[in-house]
Image (cartoon, rainbow, N blue to C red):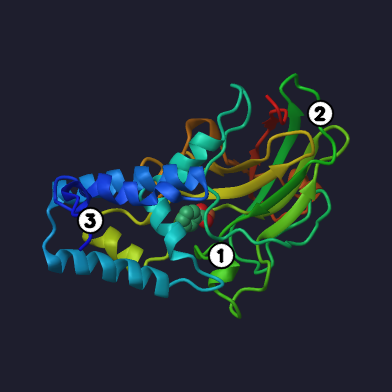
Amino acid sequence: MPVLNESSFFTEENSAEIVISRNGNAKNERLNQIMASITRHLHAAVKEIEPSQEEWMAAIQFLTSTGHTCDNWRQEYILLSDVMGVSMLVDSINSRRPSGTTENTVLGPFHLEGAPAMEFGANICLDMKGEPMVVNGRITDVAGRPLEGVKLDVWQANNEGFYDVQQKGIQPDFNLRGVFRSRTDGSYRFRGVKPRHYPIPNDGPVGQLLNKLGRNNRRPAHLHFVISAEGYQEVTTHIFVPDDPYINDDAVFGVKESLLRDFVHIDNSAKAAEYGVANPFYEVEFNVVLAEANS
Ligand code: BEZ
Ligand code: FE
């Protein structure tokens, strides 16, 4: 007969501690620390909620269906993290940078590796829908020195509110995506279409959850950037249209005041011809300040 040690049996009171103590032989101390924290918080939540068996099964089913909704083109777990504010929290923790440098925001699930390299001023819009827009800016370091050769990976939804990967076979591949490099004076330019607000994917479990919670599922109009240069911290960010109706109710909490930009309506045929866009058009300036890698 094994010797009974009462304190090693699971009880409602000791539930978290007994689970944590079983992980004592973990080969990775960080994993041990993470699992201890998650176990403590999860058990505390279950004790607070006191779910019925049916409610707990509903939670399991929700997570199961979230997994079943994921494939090579869709990541419903990232979306869940986004709408719970966790993506933005992890991003904030990992992108504490010196003041005056360009702030990060959420990457989102629609970034693609391998977008085409494009020349200064090129048009990323391949489906010819929407109001023309020109984006101009300069990349500098914190001292205001121009940075040459900085990579700007940009992407946006089309005029109907969908990314190319959401409409494979409907939109041209790599519609509204491009990779640009800043010039000697730090300048960059590209053409696209004025962004519009759009719903995050709402045909899966996360969309249903937002609906049940009575929450908005829209993102205010924005353009995405990943900006990188050797020796500098990478910036994953957006610029937002400030008068968008959802600017204060972003479904994924990505808006920051420093990322609001004026999208100026221009009616000037000479300027339009210079940029190679139809008149009238929108112009927006987005200057970027990069922090050194070890600052
Ligand atoms: C996006 O802006 O592309 C996005 C971000 C989070 C969730 C869904 C979409
Ligand atoms: Fe987006």
Q: Helix, strand, or loop for circle 2? A: loop
Residue at the image point whose x is 82% and y is 48% from the top: 120
**Label 1: which residue?**
163
Q: Is mark 1 within 8 Å of ligand 1?
A: yes
Looking at the rendered structure, which numbered label has been put on residue 146?
Answer: 2
Q: Position of residue 129 (x, y in %)?
A: 60, 65
Residue at the image point whose x is 54% and y is 62% from the top: 159
Q: Quadrant of residue 266?
A: top right
Alpha carbon of mark 1 to alpha carbon of mark 2: how far? 32 Å
Amino acid beneath label 3: Leu
Which numbered disc flags the more N-terminal residue, 3 or 2? 2
Q: Quadrant of the C terminus?
A: top right
**Label 3: which residue?**
213
Alpha carbon of mark 1 to alpha carbon of mark 3: how far? 26 Å
Bin the neighbour count of mark 1 within 10 Å (Cα to Cα): few under 14, some 14-19, many 20 and up: many
Q: Position of residue 169 (x, y in %)?
A: 61, 80
Bin the neighbour count of mark 3 within 10 Å (Cα to Cα): few under 14, some 14-19, many 20 and up: few
Q: Nearer the viewer, mark 1 or mark 3?
A: 3
Q: Is the residue 295 above or below the residue 65 in the image?
A: above
Q: Quadrant of the N terminus?
A: bottom left
Q: Is the residue 258 above or below the residue 193 in the image?
A: above
Alpha carbon of mark 3 to alpha carbon of mark 2: how far? 47 Å
Question: In the current view of this chain or complex, which residue is farthest to the bottom?
Answer: 169
Q: Position of residue 135 (x, y in %)?
A: 68, 44
Q: Helix, strand, or loop for circle 1? A: loop
Bin the neighbour count of mark 2 within 10 Å (Cα to Cα): few under 14, some 14-19, many 20 and up: some
Q: Is residue 254 visible?
A: no
Q: Nearer the viewer, residue 149 or 282?
A: 149
Q: Relative to 47, is 215 on the left or the right?
A: right
Q: Position of residue 76 (x, y in %)?
A: 43, 65
